[in-house]
Each structure stands twice: as C-alpha cells, then as structure tokens.
C-alpha cells in the first residue's frame, strides 16, 4: 500500500523517459489560460502521457520477464547439469549453452533469487551429498557419486560449505 493508505493502489514506478519528459515540456509550453478550459486539449495530452507510461511499463515488464526467465532457466539447467555431472558441472558451460554471458546470467540470478549461480551450485551439491549420506552410503561412495576425484576433496568442499564434516550426516 502506498502512502500507508488503507486501500490498495495499483501503480508502477518507473523513470521518466525522454519522450515523456519532452511531452510534459510541450504541454507546459502550450499551457495558456484559455486552453485550461479546453477539455480536448487537456484530455488529449493526458491520454498521450498515459500511452507513454504504458509503453514504458510494457518495455520494463518485457525486459524483467526476459531476465527472470533466463535466471530461472539457468537455475533449472544447473540442477540438471549437477544431476548429470555432479561437481564437474560448470557455470561457464551453462552460460555457453544458454548463449548468455556468465556475468550477465549471474547478475540476473542474484537479482531474482538473491544468490549467485556458484552459491546455488554449492547448495545443490551439499543437499545431494546430505541425501546420499543419510541413505547410508559411505563418504567415499558419496564423493564418487558426486564425481569428486577423491574423498578428501569432497570432505574439504563439504566442510567449507557446512562447517561440519560429512560424517555428521551419516
């Protein structure tokens, strides 16, 4: 609710673009005392400002929609990569397959989900590791299931990301 109003007000905030600014300048320049009584002058200029606002909102929603969709696709694709390649799943492969620069993709993901793709990758790997460990497989099997080169490398990754040793989840 805006202005702490008790009723919901539907609105969109956006920066005033050059076209809108110019339209406002033209309206102000053409304001004459006699024209203020002219409903068609006021109406036509008001309609033009509303049309410009709608254009700006649609452009912004389309851009945000695209960015959010890219972030969501990256997240889903990363989960699949980890399912297939374990810890060998790389963000650069994701970026290459989606044909989007990895920095851009990371920025989108962080904006919409609050974490980088690397943070998400680590979280997914940790969750898979915890699941494997809780099903009773050994740390060595867990490490190899997640495609680590050694149990030591897995132990190091796990402890750095959870603060505890994998053994505590068995």
Image (tube, rainbow, N blue to C red):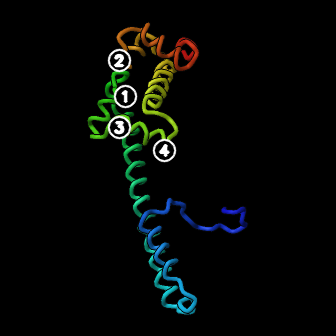
N-term mark: 4 or 1: 1
Q: Position of residue 61 (x, y in %)?
A: 43, 59
The residue where tag 2 is placed is 147
Q: Position of residue 152 (x, y in %)?
A: 44, 7
Q: Are marks 4 and 1 in contact (CB under 8 Å)?
A: no
N-term mark: 3 or 4: 3
N-term mark: 3 or 2: 3
The residue where tag 4 is placed is 112
N-term mark: 1 or 3: 3
Q: Position of residue 39 (x, y in %)?
A: 53, 91
**Closer to the observer: label 4 or label 1?**
4
Which residue corresponds to the image point at 48% horizontal and 42% vertical from the top-left? 111
N-term mark: 1 or 2: 1
Few, some or many C-alpha atoms within 10 Å of disc 2 (few <14, some 14-19, many ≥20)? Answer: some
Vertical comparison of 124 with 14: above or below: above
In this picture, residue 11 sits left or right of residue 105: right
Estimate the spatial distance between the alpha carbons at disc 3 and disc 4, rounded to whole Å.
16 Å
In the picture, the quarter occupied by the N terminus is bottom right
Tag 3's secondary structure? helix
In this picture, residue 48 sits left or right of residue 8: left
Tag 4's secondary structure? helix
Q: Position of residue 32 (x, y in %)?
A: 54, 86
Estimate the spatial distance between the alpha carbons at disc 1 and disc 2, rounded to whole Å.
10 Å
Which residue corresponds to the image point at 54% horizontal and 61% vertical from the top-left? 13
In the picture, the quarter occupied by the C terminus is top right
Few, some or many C-alpha atoms within 10 Å of disc 3 (few <14, some 14-19, many ≥20)? Answer: some
**Closer to the observer: label 3 or label 2?**
3
Q: State the mark number for residue 102.
A: none
- Nearest the eye: 68 or 4: 4
Q: Quadrant of residue 51?
A: bottom left
The residue where tag 1 is placed is 82
The residue where tag 3 is placed is 77
């Amino acid at each position: 609710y805006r202005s702490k109003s008790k009723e919901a007000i539907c609105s969109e905030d956006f920066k005033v673009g050059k076209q809108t600014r110019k339209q406002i300048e033209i309206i102000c320049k053409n304001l004459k005392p006699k024209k203020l009584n002219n409903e068609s002058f006021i109406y036509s200029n008001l309609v033009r400002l509303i049309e410009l606002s709608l254009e700006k909102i649609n452009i912004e929603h389309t851009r945000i929609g695209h960015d959010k969709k890219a972030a969501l696709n990256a997240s889903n694709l990363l989960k699949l990569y980890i399912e297939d390649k374990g810890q060998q799943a790389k963000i650069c492969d994701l970026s290459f397959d989606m044909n989007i620069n990895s920095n851009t993709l990371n920025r989108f993901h962080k904006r919409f989900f609050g974490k980088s793709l690397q943070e998400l990758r680590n979280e997914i790997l940790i969750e898979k590791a915890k699941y494997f460990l809780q099903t009773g497989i050994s740390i060595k099997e867990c490490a190899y299931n997640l495609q680590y080169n050694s149990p030591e490398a897995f132990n190091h990754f796990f402890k750095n990301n959870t603060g505890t040793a994998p053994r505590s989840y068995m």
